[in-house]
Amino acid sequence: MRQPALLSLRIVVSLLYAISVARALSSSSFTSTSYSSASSLVSSLITDERCFSTTAGAQIFADCCATNIVYEDCFHPQPFVGRSNVEKYLMDKVQERQGKGYVRLDKVSDGKRACGYAWTWVSRSSSSSAGSDDEEEEEDGLRGTTFVELNAAGEIQYVREIPEPIFKPGDLTLQLLKSLTEGATPRALPEFVPRPNLPRDSCDVVKYLFQELQGRDVDLAMELFSQDIIYRDFNYKDLMRGKQEVRQFIKDFSFPGIEFRMQRVDDGVVSTCFTWEVVLMDAPDSIKGVSFYELDPNTRLIKYVRDVPESAIKPPILGKLARQLRPGLGVFQGRHRRRTVQEKLTEEDGL
């Protein structure tokens, strides 16, 4: 009589154990819906899960994607469409750079339904090893900016990623654009109605700049910039610092025949990211890009900008060679230094 009772007790104990394990796995599983915003999701995927340098992290990223996700890595000629294709793309990227470093999250906008982030690929120095005195010595490699948008279910439905161009043409870009648009007539702009008060949220600031002002008045545009603005355009090697330099830069690129079109914008308050395209006259193709804007939280003026345009060649010749020769960095020569992450970011931010 005791044997059936003992058997029943064992079955009950086994079931209770199975239920507890299932609950533990369920509570610890990573899902995009566990996060209150796109910003917090992206921060966790990159910093905690190492989604671009580990297979486990890449799988978690793929699991957070919508079935119809569109992932534009502008290093490639065509976007990756669908969760399975994006998963393969992420796994291939991890395999290429396995054990060679990680993506450092430099800045992330505070958007809820969408966000953007500035990143740097970081590789360990060849002279360093785990547990040694030199383990903090690292090389900064390729930089870039990425825009991420969620759907109503909190899944990643769209990504645009653009790495910096290795060859930075500088003012050659301006000269080329002016020669291509020579003789163009100014396009008719809709009537502009000045706002009684300047916008204060970052996503509204960029909409005001590029959808309302549309380059028609440089002085009005400059009212939105801080005196100590830091402006990084990856067509140029050096940062622009201060309103005078930035004003001249904006003025230089304000001429007929070139149209800047905003595409997707996140809903960030202090910082924002958006995708865009530049159209030259009646050309069938456009130049895509991603920009990151950050406001001073006190003055609500723009204190930092990072613009990243795509390369006209897919994949970029120098970028392709760099990835083949030095896949851990993505550049031919990194910048060698032993510093904290904050010290590294100071160079970019000017803080």
Image (spheres, grey):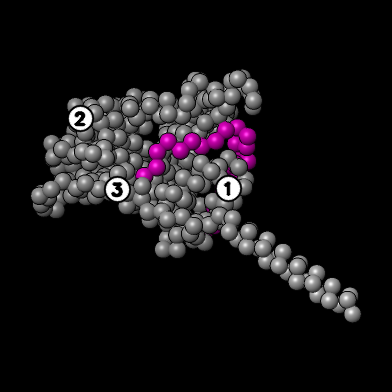
Q: Quick one: label 3, few (<14), some, or many (20+) residues within 10 Å?
A: many
For the question of whether residue 160 can be seen, the reply is: yes
Q: Residue furthest front?
A: 2
Q: Which of marks 2 and 3 is nearer the N terminus?
A: 2
Quadrant for the N terminus in the image: bottom right
Write the residue at 58% across / 48% down.
Answer: 58
Q: Do the residues labelled 2 and 1 touch (CB within 8 Å)?
A: no
- The residue tagged with tag 3: helix, strand or loop? loop
Residue 183 in view, yes or no: no
The residue wearing badge 1 is 58
Residue 185 lies in the magenta-colored region: no
Check residue 97 for magenta coloring: yes
User: Foreground residue, 255 or 131?
Assistant: 131
Q: Which label sits on residue 269? A: 3
Q: Quadrant of residue 150?
A: bottom left
Q: What residue type is labelled 1?
A: Ala
Q: Which residue is drawn at 68% across and 61% down?
A: 21
Choose the circle earlier in sequence order: 3 or 1: 1
Residue 195 at what x, y percent from top left?
12, 50
Q: What stretch is highlighted in magenta?
A: 82-109
SS of the residue under disc 1: helix
- Report the quarter where the C terminus lies: top left
Q: How far apart are marks 2 and 1 (CA)?
A: 41 Å
Location of mark 2 (residue): 227
